Image: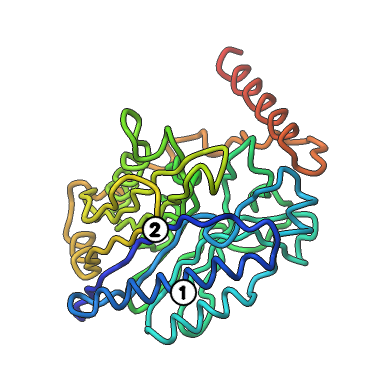
């Protein structure tokens, strides 16, 4: 069996956020420079073959309403940014998990998605659209909520460096997205994230580290997690402490950026051959093979968003209203 072992680089950014499409070029150019640094830095060691970036590295939802997002910052994919990443992936013979950008799609004209792309030298391997926006604040759409949505919610790319899937930020607080990715074949779970204080990598909560380690061990997957490291100045009203990390399939932290704002790159080995051997030979702690799926009837029940609602265009106020209705339904179901 061919031995597949290489390094992954989890990168974090500290950019001023674009407020118009033309300003996205500045971020993309710096991302290309960071990729060069990640690859060159590993030349004397185990070569880097996967480079990942955080949520909002290309652009962030700096506007409160969908109309302004569509008008000023949202872009179609593919675009000039993904083309530059494709050229860089081809140059270095690597795969790149892009930072996210706000996406519009003529197929779904009334929606904006928070989207990241896995890119190789031949172009985009998949687009992942955030399934669990950070409500009530985030007003971009979940593809789950769109009637007639036709694309795969949790795509996995089968590549020569392993099977790669991703989910964005708040998706990871739910165990289901990464579990579905693992069931779909993922061996490497990429976390494209902008998780902020106090839930970030800071004591006493440190959700960031806890969740990354849990998702790795419960799915027997590597986790390559890039987190936003912007200061309050760059991305108010929150501060972001980075701590990007790489975790092995038993939940061991292989590398972790020091806590604090600013650009950083952390590199660690990915051994796909070892992962495949463990999955094949393990009997204990083979959690994917131990799933008793029919034991959980809750997954046959619709919870969010409430059904039969004339939702109209998403907004902060509407998100709050829908959350309250779901809470009421849960309370009715629990107490009769």
Decide which of tag 1 and tag 2 comes sooner along the chain.
Answer: 1
Q: Is residue 269 visible?
A: yes
Give above or below for 139 relative to 130: above
The foreground one among 285 and 242 is 242
CA separation, marks 1 and 2?
A: 13 Å
Percent position (x, y) of residue 219?
32, 51
Q: Circle 2 sits in a helix, a strand or a loop, which is it?
A: loop
Give above or below for 98 relative to 201: below
Percent position (x, y) of residue 46?
20, 75
Percent position (x, y) of residue 165?
43, 62
Q: Which mark is residue 215?
A: none
Disc 2 residue crowd, few under 14, some 14–19, many 20+, Cα 10 Å: some
> Can you identify the residue that label 2 sits on?
263
Residue for point 61% across, 13% down: 336
Percent position (x, y) of residue 207?
37, 37
Q: Quadrant of residue 157?
A: bottom left
> Can you identify the residue that label 1 sits on?
32
Give above or below for 171 relative to 296: below
The foreground one among 7 and 105 is 7
Number of numbered discs on residues: 2
Q: Circle 1 sits in a helix, a strand or a loop, which is it?
A: helix
The foreground one among 131 and 184 is 131
Residue for point 35% across, 40% down: 201
Q: Is residue 1 left or right of residue 97?
A: left
The foreground one among 117 and 13 is 13
Q: Farthest residue to the front: give it.
A: 233
Q: Is residue 177 visible?
A: no
Q: Quadrant of residue 221?
A: bottom left
Q: Is residue 181 left or right of residue 106?
A: left
Image quadrant containing the N terminus:
bottom left
Residue for point 59% across, 74% down: 81
Disc 1 residue crowd, few under 14, some 14–19, many 20+, Cα 10 Å: some
């Amino acid at each position: 069996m061919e031995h597949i072992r290489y390094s992954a680089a989890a990168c974090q950014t500290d950019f001023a956020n674009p407020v118009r499409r033309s300003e996205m070029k500045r971020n993309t150019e710096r991302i290309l420079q960071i990729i060069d640094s990640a690859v060159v830095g590993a030349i004397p060691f185990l070569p880097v073959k996967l480079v990942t970036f955080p949520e909002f590295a290309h652009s962030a939802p700096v506007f409160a309403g969908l109309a302004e997002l569509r008008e000023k910052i949202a872009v179609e994919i593919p675009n000039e940014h993904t083309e530059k990443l494709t050229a860089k992936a081809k140059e270095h013979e690597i795969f790149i998990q892009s930072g996210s950008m706000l996406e519009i799609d003529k197929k779904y004209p009334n929606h904006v998605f928070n989207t990241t792309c896995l890119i190789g030298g031949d172009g985009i391997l998949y687009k992942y659209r955030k399934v669990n926006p950070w409500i009530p604040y985030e007003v971009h759409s979940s593809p789950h909520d769109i009637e007639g949505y036709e694309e795969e919610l949790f795509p996995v790319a089968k590549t020569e460096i392993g099977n790669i899937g991703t989910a964005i930020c708040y998706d990871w607080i739910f165990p289901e997205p990464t579990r579905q990715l693992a069931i779909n074949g993922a061996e490497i779970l990429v976390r494209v994230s902008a998780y902020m204080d106090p839930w970030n990598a800071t004591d006493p909560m440190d959700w960031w580290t806890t969740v990354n380690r849990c998702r790795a061990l419960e799915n027997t997957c590597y986790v390559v997690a890039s987190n936003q490291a912007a200061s309050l100045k760059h991305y108010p009203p929150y501060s972001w402490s980075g701590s990007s990390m790489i975790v092995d399939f038993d939940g061991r932290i292989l590398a972790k950026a020091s806590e604090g704002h600013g650009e950083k790159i952390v590199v660690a080995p990915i051994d796909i051959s070892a992962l495949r051997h463990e999955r094949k030979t393990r009997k204990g702690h083979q959690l994917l093979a131990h799933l008793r799926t029919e034991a959980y009837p809750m997954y046959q029940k619709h919870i969010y968003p409430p059904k039969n609602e004339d939702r109209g265009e998403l907004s902060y106020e509407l998100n709050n209203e829908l959350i309250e209705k779901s809470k009421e339904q849960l309370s009715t179901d629990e107490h009769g």
